[in-house]
Amino acid sequence: MKQNMNLRKLATVTKKPPLYKKGDSIMWTDKHISKQLLELHLNPDIDLASRKKQSINDTLVFILKQCNNSKLKILDLGCGPGLYARRLAATGHDVTGIDFSETSIEYALNQAKAEKLNIEYICKDYLTIDYRNKFDLVLLIYTDFGVLIPAEREKLLSIIHKALKPNGTFIFDVINNNNTEQIFQENKTWAFEANGFWKETAYLELANSFHYKNEKVFMQQHIIIDQKEIVKTYRFWTHYFENNDIVKLLSDSGFTSIEGFENVLPNTNIWSGDNITFYKTIKR
């Protein structure tokens, strides 16, 4: 790196930003990063981009236990490379998967073709979809609900409510408020990579994490500086919830029969089993 790096600029971008201020870069549409994410999705032994194989199987057993229909029309939001959709389709369900990553959707389509599974995959931001009374079951798995800011959460719940058939079911999981002081601790780290997750060329990574306790949200920030001193900032907001928070959100959006389930999954690489709550609710 050159000696004239703008340290004042770095001092500014590494400070704690205002709540919900976006970064200037998007991870999901970057071709290099999306390939790295796909590899993480497909690793059956870790709980990063997707949960490991056993956790996925346990999740599907739990989901299908909550739904008594022999065949369901299912919408899998944030489907990634189809790890859940593929298994559901193989057991006779009619599945539509939606994800923002072209790389993940391309992989999912190829897998479905290879396995002769009739799954509809769509590369799209699920906050822009518009279905009406079409699905028996909508899924939003791997705590995706918590990465949305409040306005996005309300919008998504409205979208899901419209997409479900009368008495349709919505199942999703969130990080609850168990042990948040131990889990969400602010820190700073840095690393230099000749090539790695963020870029295929050399880069410096400055990582910070910030806890906004009043709003029950934790933000992870990654500042990437390449050899040309181009600075990119990625920010990821992760909310955790009390049961009353979820009940109010769902009730206000027209859902009823709200049930929460802890310890659905065993301990993972990241969370203990009681840090994740699954919710099942019905379209009113």
Image: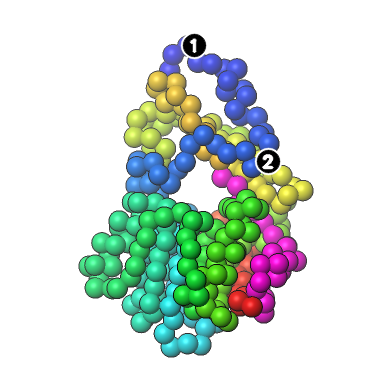
Q: Is residue 259 magenta?
A: yes
- The x and y percentages for residue 125 are 46, 54
> Label 1 neighbourhood size at 10 Å, few (<14), some (14-19), many (20+)?
few
Sequence order check, earlier mark of 1 and 2: 1
Residue ID at (26%, 61%): 110
Most foreground residue, 102 or 277 = 102
The disc placed on residue 19 is 2
Specify the amino acid type for callout 2: Leu
* Magenta-highlighted residues: 236-263
Name the image quarter holding the C terminus: bottom right
Instruction: Say if 33 sits above or below 119 in the image.
Output: above
How far across and down, in percent of the image, does residue 19 sit? 68, 41
Residue that mark 1 sits on: 4
Residue 271 visible in the snapshot: no
Residue 183 in magenta?
no
x%, y% of residue 236?
56, 45
Mark 1 vs mark 2: in front: 2
Name the residue: 44% across, 13% down.
2
Residue at x 40% of width, y 20% of height: 228
Say whether residue 172 is left or right of residue 229: right
Label 2 SS: loop
Residue 207 visible to an observer of this rendering: yes
